[in-house]
Image (cartoon, grey):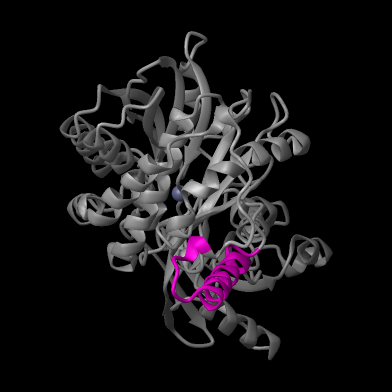
Amino acid sequence: VPPDSRPCPGLPRRMFVPGLLAAALALAPATPIRAATANPAPAVPADVAVPPADAARIAGAALASDRAWRRLSELCDGIGHRLSGSAALDRAVAWARAAMVEDGLDSVWLQPVKVPRWVRGQESATLVEPMPLELPMLGLGRSVGTPKGGITAPVVAVSSFDEMAALPPERVRGRIVLWNVPFTTYGQTVRYRSRGANEASRRGAVASLVRAIGPTGLRTPHTGNMAAYNDSFPRIPGAALSAEDTDMIQRLLDRGTGVKVRLSMQADTLPDGVSHNVIGELRGRERPDEIVVVGGHLDSWDVGQGAHDDGGGCVIAMESLRLLKELGLRPRRTLRVVLWTNEENGARGAKAYADSIGTRQRHVAAIESDGGVERVVGFGFRLLKAGTDSTDAGATARLVERARPLSRLLAGIDAAAIDGDGGGTDIEPLMKLGVPGIAHQTTMERYFQRHHTAADVMSHVDPLELRRNVAAFAIMSWALAEMPGTLVP
Ligand SMILES: [Zn+2]
């Protein structure tokens, strides 16, 4: 997932961009949009300057190619979803490696990573009272299963941890807790998916259900990982229901109607398996030991196709290097693509990569694409306080100012927003080492409706938006690897 700090993902930007376009067109109907700028742009400092003509060539090649679309279709339709430890993820690793070799990168290698292996098995949730009804559900990653025959118990619904804490013990003990927390932002609501089972078990509940972590969709449950079990309490199963069924249960309870659910899950955790980060690079022509890392995560949840999360990000990063190679643009620094494994239920690929980098090479920037293939708006840049995961506000503000001249390279494809909202799960361990973390940002208007659901499939990816994302990502990757100076001088 992208950084949690974004308030309502993308909406203000989405509303802003068409307004800006309309204003530009009204001002200068007969001239190109970029000519409508009232004041001449300030001069670009020499050490962050790159040839705009090369950016235009990259954009032209990206917008003309359906290669990324064909690649994403190979991954989504040919391999499908790919949870850590699955045979499908092994196939995806082999596929990505072969694709990078085919693209002619200077070196391509696999980095072994030990990953957890959680398997879903058969599962169901059934309303037993007041009437029988099958409820679409998804077990949560890391959850234990239920005993054979399932767990049947009355449901108690709560809308927050505080409300739970205030309930008398007999209202919770022996029941199934339903966390009915309407979606606001991912960061605010995902806590109930993470900690719900532990908090319910602490009060004596026998299972934990969570309202879908996403805006109301089409009666779609969303899976995702739970926090590690707190071994002071029994391990109880956790699963997600759709927003609509959660609303229905809440209405029944509000009317004083007893609700009973049977939850049945075969979920199990097997011994760790071995997966791989897939890595390829274009070696720098002048400073090969300075590395710009770009990528996404190759694993996905075990539903849908992982098209937006994060097959698209992987393909966008791979295609960026392929385009530069095809155009003969060998950057000053080494540009390295990393497709991380196990982002969804462990982030062990991210840790293994950061642990491996050593001191001979210097990582000067890291870009992650994990916000789906929607309309691209720009890039976020962020620096952390050394050794921590908290933002260094002053250093980030300086970083954003330094990166700002790069936005003019992206204005032509309407992706020129530059802000301080950088980062990503897979690049966070690098950021803790002082590497500037950059998020590839899209509007994310529909992202959380499909995130971790059976609906995250290729049919919901717009081929033209995919091309524009490749264009923006390739230009930013190239600019950071090519500019004479580095983002943090
Ligand atoms: Zn993701």
Query: Residue 306, percent across and down?
Result: 35, 54
Query: Residue 137, percent across and down?
Result: 44, 68
Single out the residue that lies furthest toward the bottom. Answer: 255
Query: Residue 5, percent across and down?
Result: 66, 52
Q: Residue at x 80, y 67 (%)?
A: 167
The foreground one among 159 and 423 is 423
Check the picture and name the quadrant holding the C terminus: top right
In the figure, 98 relative to 221: above or below? above
The foreground one among 399 and 483 is 483
**Is residue 9 shown in magenta?**
yes
- Residue 151, visible in the rendered structure: no
- Residue 106, visible in the rendered structure: yes
Q: Which residues are magenta?
A: 8-35
Query: Residue 63, percent across and down?
Result: 29, 56
In the picture, measured across the screen, residue 67 lies left or right of residue 141, that is left
**Is residue 403 shown in magenta?**
no
In the picture, measured across the screen, residue 200 lies left or right of residue 77, that is right
Give the main secondary structure of the magenta stretch: helix
In the picture, measured across the screen, residue 314 lies left or right of residue 39, that is left
Q: Residue at x 31, y 39 (%)?
A: 318
